[in-house]
Image (cartoon, rainbow, N blue to C red):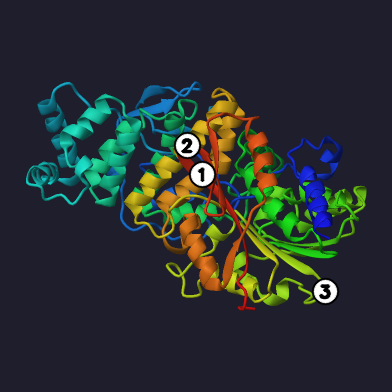
Amino acid sequence: MQASKQHRSSGMSKRLHYQPMQEVEAYCLPPFRVLDHQPPYNESSQSTHSTAQSFRERYCTLESSSANGSYNTLYNSPSTVSFSPNGSPVSQHDQDSHYQYHSPDHTYGSSISGSCITDDATDFKYKLKELETAMLGDSNIFDNYCSSLQNGASNTRPEVDSWGQIMDSISKKDLNQVLVFCAKAVADNDLLMAQWMMDELRQMVAVSGEPIERLGAYMLEGLVARRASSGSSICKALRCKEPARCKEPASSELLSYMHILYEVCPYFKFGYMSANGAIAEAMKDENRVHIIDFQIGQGSQWLTLIQAFAARPGGPPHIRITGIDDSMSAYARGGGLSIVGKRLSKLAEMFKVPFEFHATAISGCDVQLENLGVKPGEEALAMNFAFMLHHMPDESVSTQNHRDRLLRLVKSLSPKVVTLVEQESNTNTAAFFPRFVETLNYYTAMFESIDVTLPRNRKERIDVEQHCLAREIVNIIACEGVERVERHELLGKWRSRFAMAGFTPYPLSSLVNATIETLLKNYSDKYRLQERDGALYLGWKNRDLVASCAWKCKPGTD
């Protein structure tokens, strides 16, 4: 009996190896899971010295109210900078200012003033004083700022307490440090300092430059959005429910961007393969398997698993997949969940696997027991949370705490295995400034990894970064409360949540680990795979980026 089990496990593991799968290409959607419930944004170009109402319109907001206060004066600059098609700064005068954000052929409206750096510190201070007086009247904001630094009254961290450090970072074009200084000024509500550093940053970022220059463009836009309207307008724009009105890319284009991102970096393949390995191991002796995927996206995670079950010694089980997905994903998919069901059904038919698909087009926040179609005692349950739970609001956002509510609901169904794949980042409950620094560090590694496989001068890379990554970045930086949907947690926190819900770790398959190691050899030797405390971590250099683990019900808690 034991030998039979090992034989089954080995046979299925071989089918879980990464493979191009040209033979099933006609039956699958581009292999990428939608990481957000909302389609990406694409802002139209407008002058940033507009009213709060025009700012709202620029970000295609359909239902938001005007931001409190006016920042018109701050953005009224006689000199401007834009990006040339190669991503370098180009001076422009006597016109409204924008910088390239969409692509070298499209602009994204953000005001840009000329540099106020001079070789003479006294001259600089005089010019800044003139600017302050012009904007705010005869006040002492700049003098008070310098005085607070000298007297140690500032509550900033030690590394940002020196004016000399700020000047030195700008003169050296240390983009990473200037971004941090600017974020600290925004966090401290230092209006004048934040605006001045934003103006300097606009001349340092480029959407076709080094990884930090490209990331800097999106980090800066998040700061601008947060400073101008506390993020309200842009965050509501990110949830635009009429893509055509919001000038979104065509669904076929968006799907293409997702496919490119899936291919150029291994993060999603890693997550899907590790989760599938745990499910295959848990279900190796089951005749009827019900997989509930809480964010099925394109359904591509299940292509290799269906094939693995087809190769199982003794024949495949009957597989039923319940696909849950917010209706917002339908735009990227080009239609409803029926598209996913039909294509998975065709694939299963080709491999002679008995298959059913159950579509549940609702948000994870709305999932109730009756939506899952569970048949107690008739099938073995597997629950899949891949890149999904971080979108669920927790106790810090809502008393309903859907993040923990879903885990308790799942536990009540006594599944054989529950898989979790999440980005290894800490942005959920962190205050704005540490959240900004964490986002900067995390996405620096992400952008560097993309740089290895996708040339900087390719328009596709700009589109991928804008439509698949920039939205996440801006949401984390500019939004708060229920509008901030990107709320990542470190695996240590997820462990606590699963343990409190009544789960214990389920061991991952060592055979799958070896398969992932082989996969990574196709990319770069800078990727790092580590197994720690029963979980798998995929990182770039010394930064963990994605974590994967599996869980089962704690004995005696059913």
Q: Tell me the tag on residue 445.
A: 2
Check disc 3 and report the residue beneath it: 378
x, y (%) of residue 556? 62, 78
Residue in the image at 90% along x and 55% along y: 315
Question: Residue flagged by tag 2: what amino acid is it?
Answer: Ala
Q: Tell me the tag on residue 99.
A: none
Camera-side residue of 110 and 53: 110
Q: Quadrant of the C terminus?
A: bottom right
In which quarter of the view is residue 391 placed? bottom right
Callout 1 secondary element: strand
Question: Residue flagged by tag 1: what amino acid is it?
Answer: Leu
- Labels 2 and 1: the sequence-earlier one: 2
2 vs 3, front mark? 3
Q: Could you tell me if residue 149 is visible in this image?
A: yes
- Labels 2 and 3: the sequence-earlier one: 3
x, y (%) of residue 227? 34, 49
Check disc 1 and report the residue beneath it: 545
x, y (%) of residue 17? 74, 41
3 vs 1, front mark? 3
- Would residue 515 be found to the left or right of residue 321 on screen? left
Residue 558's place in the image compared with 173, above or below, is: below
Residue in the image at 58% along x and 46% along y: 40
Disc 2 and disc 1 in contact, CB within 8 angstroms: yes
Residue 444's place in the image compared with 556, above or below, is: above
Callout 2 secondary element: helix
Q: Quadrant of the N terminus?
A: bottom right
Residue in the image at 30% along x and 35% along y: 178
